[in-house]
Image: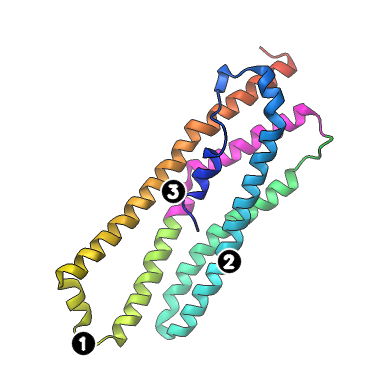
Amino acid sequence: MNWDDWELLWRRQDPPAGKAADLVALKETFEPKRRKLARAVLVRNLLEGVGGIIMVAVFAGMAWRVGRGGWPILIGAALILGVSLVFLRDLLRVRRCRLGPEAPLLAKLAAEIAELRQQRRLLANIGTWYFLPYLAAIIIIGGTLAHASGRKAPPGFLVALLTTPLSLAWIIVLTASIGLALFWAWRANRDAVHRQIDPRIEELEKLQRELTGQP
């Protein structure tokens, strides 16, 4: 999992001009940009989908090694699996809707606008279906492993860990860093909707109206 991947997917694209875009330039750059976006979405879906399944297998192995007390790890693994299935489903959807190179420009335009709207929906709700399940999985898996380690630790070890100023400071810094990283990634991905996707949709809709003779 890389929380920056989504935002980077859009940051690699040239900033769209939106409604002010030049129609000639739109026609010339449409196909390269369409292919670039398709490749980026394909790579993202494969990495997140297959990578999540590998993580599930790793955590299932951890649960088996921990023993009876490790069953909550399977709940965390199930949350990660759910996120991975979203990407794999999107992978199949893109494959089903893919147009051949012989398709007319208007058909490609309509398909690209529909694709951008789908990616917009995913990003607009990314906190609910992506970050929250992963955060819950981290808490569940981390808490279970910490509890299992605590049972094997010397008596009083956890109390000393939480009351020693240096170790307590490290725990606070680590927790705050994870929280800030999650918040930054969430904001960056939400901002990509307004800075990249919405203007790009406006560009393509302008080109679509021009080609169809609509006002």
Q: How far across and down, in percent of the image, does residue 85 sit? A: 59, 58
Query: Label 2, on which residue?
Result: 53
Give the mark nearest the N terminus, 1 or 3: 3
- Residue at the top extreme? 215
Give the mark nearest the N terminus, 2 or 3: 2
Magenta stretch, residue numbers: 103-131
Which picture quadrant has residue 116? top right
Magenta stretch encompasses residue 118? yes
Q: In the displayed structure, does residue 140 sit left or right of residue 94?
A: left
Q: Residue at x 29, y 60 (%)?
A: 175
Query: Label 3, on which residue?
Result: 127
Q: How far across and down, in percent of the image, does residue 15 sit? A: 53, 29
Amino acid bearing label 1: Pro
Q: Element at badge 1?
A: loop
Query: Label 1, on which residue?
Result: 155
Q: How far across and down, in percent of the image, does residue 65 sit? A: 47, 84
Q: Is residue 69 above or below residue 121?
A: below
Give the mark nearest the N terminus, 1 or 2: 2
Mark 1 or 3: the one toward you? 1
Q: Residue at x 53, y 68 (%)?
A: 55
Amino acid bearing label 2: Ile
> Toward the viewer: 158 or 133?
158
Magenta stretch encompasses residue 15? no
State the CA–CA distance, disc 1 to disc 2. Answer: 37 Å
State the CA–CA distance, disc 1 to disc 3. Answer: 40 Å
Amino acid bearing label 3: Gly
- Decide: few, some or many residues near mark 2? Use Cα within 10 Å; few <14, some 14-19, many ≥20: many
